[in-house]
Amino acid sequence: MGYEGIGASVRRREDLRFLSGRGIYTDDINRPHQAYAVIVRSPHAHARIRGIDASAARSAPGVIAVFTGADMAAEKIGGLPCGWQVKNKDGTPMAEPPHPVLAVGKVRHVGDPVAVVVAETKPQARDAAERIVIDWEVLPAAATIQAALQPGAPSVHDDVPGNVCFDWHLGDKTAVDAAFARAHKVARLELSNNRLIPNAMEPRCAVGEYDPATGDYTLWTTSQNPHVIRLLMGAFVLNIPEHKLRVVAPDVGGGFGSKIHHYAEEAIVTWAAGKLKRPVKWTADRTESFMSDAHGRDHVTEAELALDDEGRFLALRVRTLANLGAYLSTFAPCVPTYLYATLLAGVYTTPAIYAEVKAVFTNTVPVDAYRGAGRPEATFLIERLVDIAALEMGMDRVEIRRRNFIPKDAFPYQTPVALQYDSGDYHRTLDEALKAAKWDTFEQRRAEAARRGKLRGIGISTYIEACGIAPSAVVGSLGARAGLYEVANIRVNPTGSITVFTGTHSHGQGHETTFAQLIADRFGVPMSQVEIVHGDTAKVPFGMGTYGSRSLAVGGSAIVRASDKIIAKAKRIAAHLLEASVEDIEFKNGMFRVAGTDRAKSFAEVSLAAYVPHNYPIEELEPGLEETAFYDPKNFTFPAGCHICEVEIDPETGEVEVVNFTAVDDVGRVINPMIVEGQVQGGVAQGIGQALFETCVYDEAGQLLSGSMMDYTMPRADDVPYIQVGTAVTLCTHNPLGVKGCGEVGAIGAPPAVIGAVVDALRDYGVRHIDMPATSHKIWRILDAGRQRLAAE
Amino acid sequence: MYEFAYHRPASVAEAVKLLAADPEAKLISGGMSLIPVLKQRLARPSALIDLGAIPDLVGISVSATTVTVKGRTTHAAVAASAEVRRAIPALAELASHIGDAQVRNRGTIGGSIAHNDPTADYPSAVLALGATVHTSRRTIAADDFFTGLFTTALEPDEIVTAVEFPIPDKAAYVKFPNPASRYAMVGVFVAKGPMGVRVAVTGAGAKGVFRHAAMEEALAKSWSPEALEGITTPAENLTTDIHASREYRAHLIGVMAKRAVAKAG
């Protein structure tokens, strides 16, 4: 056994299970007498339901029951709740229209659930679902932000005229206006941030079960946060008290945010299981995933950056329209507001910032957090605008960044948009990235590519993000209807092995390895003696789950705090056993030792004494060795870094090839470098996906045109080059590990670097900006227009 | 998938008999197009007649002048065949880039051309090489075989038994894949030989695979990429979708054709 503690690239322990097909995912769970649910979904973007005739379905072979929205309404089943309330500029709360589990009265997007058929087999449920006859009154749809804001646009919700959910702002408008009035130059940009469909490898699945003997409900679900689902579904939707509801999220095959949210199907199977006294399973097929998993991004933004005559940023003004889709998904309102506008300072000293965000309902799938959630939108905007500012000023892209960086001695740094950055060294990540990417010799590579007939470009992004969410009181004051602490329970077993129950959830991140390394480091025991348990509300204390790159910063800190409690108690036991004063006991490498002597007890001996308390200070100390800690972070953490991308464009076809990608990230202290590298590479792959390939397309009627893998372009292995990953660490100052988070940095930092490279490659064509995705088709149009212009001249 | 009856005949004659007896039955070869359609419940055949147990339908034979690929021969087999690589390397290479490894190990030439998906690769080779399609009852010239989107000259109870390709002097296939599906968004097969000079375009035509007369004429005069300079493709008969406008497809036909000629040498 080699070193397994902090800093060791230990191979992921969970991968043997995943790669050998032995993972247990929700769809692998089958209960005795299980029935199968198929959801009948709206084929229309917007339609009134005049009537539903389910008689033929009810009499179809194998059918156990058919339920509609009316059936749920009759039992006073609640709507799906929203976990965050944003306020309008005038202080009034956002519009919060109902989100029924099954549609009542009308449907609002293609894929909106209308009815559920439960049958003995899935094919029978499918057959019966086709026999349900719905009398539709098809209504005109508002399929895009622009369409929804047109005068006279169809109202997605009858009680939200104009389709505006909230009209929110942040920052100091007066200061910004004043700064623009004295600006030397203003860089302007209009852009869209393309709508994405998450596409986790594992489609969503839910199995509900009810035990009539005890009245207990169990839900197995593909979730990133089973306790949150238990709270939301139990308390707000189904009225099941939490002690009678267990939610289990077993192995989960990717989430990227899309499995944070509480979805209708979870409530449907749990409720139906109770009604029918039988377990009920629903598994999405990929088509359903496209039309029912919450989508991501989808902004339209105008921004202006005021500069002085030396290229220093004076002020930033941003107006964003954000698409929320047809309903408020669980955390939708915070994504385009507190996870977006608060990041608009970036890594720069811009003294005045004012952002307005209007969030809009449309007849599309709800939009919510997707890897990065708000921060990729902010980063793309800032970094594109900084590139344009460099053009306006005739300055080098690197130099303008350096000139505006927050210096490393300025921390803690208060931005004008609410956040206080605790640490960072942006010059260092920049320098290391420039060196690793061979920025200085790029022109040689451009010339060499030109000889091969290719247009080569280089792009850079110096991003920051906020993660490790979040201080509960702070987010509470901003509208969160939850606390965002994390919990760890550490159970030392009598023979000294350790079971850790964490409130975070691993769905690809490798927590079972990273957290075990933390414990191995803390207790001096081999990782083989450590088990990490997560994802089951019956086992784990109330925790908040995994999203926003929070697991190590918040969940890991809770593990440290619980470890401290264990060690403190174990020292008292050891002091008793060693007949020494507790102040004299040192704990190191798994041994409790009386300082300066060779008298020692091993961790296992002390554990055994705790559970077999024959020789034990029983008057002053309880037996046992198990501690729980809840950790509420003092601040967000602020990973930052520099991503550099090189592309080559085929001028004949417009195809873009990413030929080099370098990421140097400051993610705080690194526990497992191999896992960090994997997380960054995965995030960058998704960032490249957004920049070059992925986009969700609705037609005017609200039909989803990119509704399958045939039409939605996911990045593939051959689209992604080797990604060179480096880290340049500054420690987080406010959590015990000094960690910041690494899960989202790739998806945040990469898109502007890729687009910057594409724009640079096309610099002779008069291009200042290209919206994502920069498809070959889009680039060909630019090239073609350029050639025609040249021909005309 | 809806329920269907399943037959596994041992001979072509038996398969034809089953097919003739049930107009709602469908042949299944590799199933690479049919199975997804069934899974999505977009087709409801009464029966599937699986050609998988008919030994006569598999194999490749090469003569001095032709390559004959039997109907149930997989793409992987064509791609890996040393004889095909020698005789018509362009055909082996085309086969090696159809779908992915799983598709190539299941999908068959007969299934591909009988289905006549407008974005499939094989129809361009059949058309550009002037192949002859052998069926359970006759032979059909390539020019007569592909009649429109997902339609062919095959009668309802007719089965593709083999495709006979004349060996060209020069041939090559270049495709621009659809970024999402990786089917051909534009694929151009060029050939020169006993079949004359022929250029077939797949992926782009609103009515499926087609020959490009202007390019054929130019290449017949001078077999070189430069000969295609200035030859445009009218966009009106081309497909337009969220991935590519018809104008972009028209442009790509020109680029792919030049690259194909260059590659053919």
Image (spheres, coloured by chain):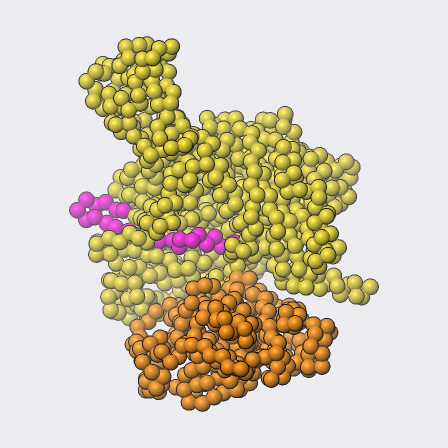
Q: Position of residue A203 (x, y in %)?
A: 40, 55
Answer whether residue A628 is visible to the viewer in this image: no
Query: What residue is shown at x 61% (from left), y 31% (from top)?
Result: A425
Q: Position of residue A53 (x, y in %)?
A: 32, 68
Identify the image quadrant of the C terminus of chain A: bottom right
Q: Is residue A547 above or below residue A636?
A: below
The residue most toward the front is B64
Q: Is residue B91 left or right of residue A97?
A: right
Q: Nearer the viewer, residue A448 or A348?
A: A448
Q: Is residue B68 above or below residue A440?
A: below
Q: Is residue A369 above or below residue B33?
A: above
Answer whether residue B163 is visible to the viewer in this image: yes
Magenta stretch containing residue A429, yes or no? no
The residue most toward the left is A213
Chain A tint in image: yellow
Q: Position of residue A123 (x, y in %)?
A: 30, 66
Please give the letter of the chain rendered in orange: B
Identify the image quadrant of the N terminus of chain A: top left
Query: What residue is shown at x 65% (from left), y 39% (from top)?
Result: A434
Query: What residue is shown at x 50% (from left), y 26% (from top)?
Result: A734
Q: Which residues are magenta?
A: A195-218
Q: Is residue A486 above or below residue A453?
A: above
Q: Is residue A405 left or right of residue B124?
A: right
Magenta stretch containing residue A208, yes or no? yes
Q: Nearer the viewer, residue B229 or B262?
A: B262
Q: Where is residue A349, by image quadrant? A: top right
The residue most toward the bottom is B138
Q: Is residue A6 left or right of residue A406?
A: left
Q: Where is residue B229, by image quadrant? A: bottom right
Q: Position of residue B137 (x, y in %)?
A: 42, 89
Q: Nearer the viewer, residue A20 or A734?
A: A20
